[in-house]
Amino acid sequence: MSKAPCNPSWFHTISHSILHPLVRASARVIACLYPAAKRWQHRFNGGVYPQYHKSLSLQHPIKETLIPKQLILPIKLSAHQKIDLKVSIGDSVQKNQLLMAASKANKHGVIVPIHAPTSGIITAIENTPLTHPSGLDALSIILEPDGKGQSLENALNINGQPPSEPQALKTILLNAGIVGLGGAGFPTYAKIPATQDQIQTLIINGAECEPFITCDDLLMQTQAAEVVQGAIMVAHALGIPKIVCAIESNKPAAIQAINHAAQHTIVTVQEVETVYPMGGEKQLLQELTGIEIPAKTHAIDSGLLVFNVATCAAIFKAVTQGEPLTQRLVTVTGLGLKTPYNMHALIGTPFSDLAELAHPNPPITYLLIMGGPMMGFKVKTNQVPVIKTTNCILANPPEPEQLTMPCIRCGECMEACPINLLPQQLFWHSQAHEFEKVEKLNVFDCIECGCCSYVCPSHIPLVQYYRHAKSAIKEQHAEQQAIELAKQRHEFRLARIEREKQERETRLKAKKEAVKQRKANASTEANAPESTQPSKKSSATTAATQKATGSSNTSQPSRASAREKAIETAKKQAAAQVGSKNTANKDPNKNPKAAAKKTAAMAAAKRRAKQNKEHTDQEASTVPSSTQAPNSESNLKAPQAPTSAEEKRQKAMEAAKKRIAERKARQSQQETH
């Protein structure tokens, strides 16, 4: 009797609803005695539990938007990118007006459009420092606000209806300039598939695991309906049947607000463990689904799509109001600020302007940090602008630098790594500049979360080594690509030179063959029998004469036929002579009649030859007189060719006569004997 097949969904439900909570509860109990047991409470490997300071900014409500003296809008991140500016210096612009168009076909990176965050005047288009770890300069638009706040309504020209197909949604997201607002900054339109039914689950990422950042928490509390409806619009366009909103357990107010907004919808809220880096895409997916995304693949390859809560809210505004992305909620916090806060900051607002509103103490004489303490970076100058991926401005006064000690090989970094890498090996090879080995150890799978550096007892800045190794490897790859390109161009050049050489040799060979063939033809004509050459020359002369005079000579065919008859007769006579010679040698006295016939034939041949000669001479003498035109220089020269031909013919006839006479003499001698 066959057994019923096992349904994996039942096992997943039981393990998720019963076994996993039991393991978590046991881990909490054990963690009191063994702190590392906390990692048993979540599915992905590693993770850390840093000290949280979220209450600093949660104590204050969201501040009113600041209109700074100038807005800095970076528009060109690479020298190879082609941009399409829609404004020039001195132009007046309105809020939501398009400043730079999108460019999807740019092979050096996808460029999303940029819109004016407020009304004002374009005062400059110049290079300014980027809000980036490199601190490089980039071309930027400098906008001076006029304070009027004039805006374009429905700047995206939408009809207010949710899109029903992926392409319509992609067009709206592209025109709105929406990117991933969780930190990655990848264009949202390029992230979603072009056809329906490719995604089974949409994940709303509300984990927000950084210790200081609270912008997503407050966004879910204040705009929960926009977050939920934005996700539903995406699911409707892509044909996604299920939506899950994941929120860390340390955000009870956000969980309550999303639960209320998600009633009677396909959205379900799932509380996840508070651990860093729970907000990472692959870590969150593994926690929710148990699926570990393979290396060098994306969530979409597994039928999953992840959006940040701020991205969902921006999608809702773009689809329903036609509003592009010109501002975002930013957390301004840190141990050096008296009144940390959150604000819907305009894109392009300088960091220093926002930090001063928080009453820094002591005064900010140090560089601010974009992002949290785990994954953030120091900016080149505090005048850098807020960009679309700026979720936090952190003002922590610098602490005394801790002395870096040698690695003791404790293995804590390996235990903390959420990607299951080997941080020790990566560090050693990076330090030794053995970048090939570093690449083989999958350094590009590192998400630079900082867990390894956080737990290192030797205070080694491991993430900095990995970043340096990544940059060096990318540079090596770029050089290798340049070398390969140069090699291909060189090989193509050599192939072209060889092809041209072969073509030249082929042409030269053909030319030599043609010359050789012409020489062969000329030698063949020179070696032809003398009896045929005069006839050819006389024929050519006669034809030229006829062409010049316009007359026709009908005697030429008769001469040719007479000549052929004479040749045939001569052949017969020669054959008869050979036969008579043989007979005479056998018995010359027995056949006197044959000898008489032979003598008569020879006499007849002589008479015919004499007649032919007289006939030929007569024709040669008549041709010039009949064809010559008076007062014509060409006709005066024409008879010269037949004269030379006749001389050769006469010589040939005389030679033939001599041969006949000699043959006759020999025959007569034989007969007398």
Image (tube, rainbow, N blue to C red):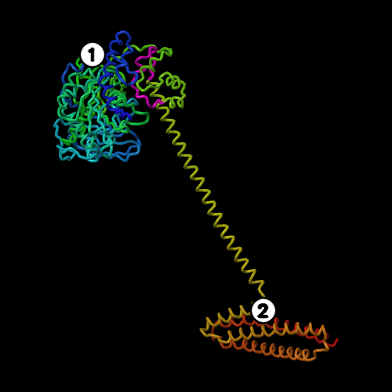
Q: Nearer the viewer, mark 2 or mark 1?
A: 2
What span is colored magenta in the figure?
442-462
The spot of residue 661 in percent (x, y) is 77, 85
Q: Quadrant of the C terminus?
A: bottom right
Extreme residue toward the right, this view: 673
Task: Give the image quarter of residue 7.
Answer: top left
> Quick check: 165 left or right of 290?
left
- Which residue is drawn at the image coordinates 38% and 17% (left, top)? 413
Q: Count the marks.
A: 2
User: In this orientation, which residue lies closer to the viewer: 173 or 635?
Assistant: 173
Q: Secondary structure at mark 1?
A: loop
Residue 459, magenta (yes or no): yes
Extreme residue toward the front, this view: 1
> Quick check: 583 left or right of 220?
right
Task: Give the image quarter of residue 535.
Answer: bottom right
Label 2 is placed on what type of residue?
Ser
Query: In this view of the protein, can residue 365 be seen by the observer?
Result: yes
Alpha carbon distance from label 2 to label 1: 126 Å
The residue to which callout 2 is attached is 531
How crowded pointer 1 is (Cα within 10 Å; few <14, some 14-19, many 20+) is rated as some
> Quick check: 134 left or right of 544?
left
The spot of residue 672 in percent (x, y) is 84, 88
- Dot label at residue 505: none
Label 1 is placed on what type of residue?
Asn
Of pointers 2 and 1, the one earlier in the residue sequence: 1
Q: Quadrant of the N terminus?
A: top left
Query: In this view of the protein, can residue 354 be seen by the observer?
Result: no
The residue to which callout 1 is attached is 361
How crowded pointer 2 is (Cα within 10 Å; few <14, some 14-19, many 20+) is rated as few
User: In this orientation, which residue lies closer to the viewer: 364 or 476?
Assistant: 476
Task: Give the image quarter of residue 512.
Answer: bottom right
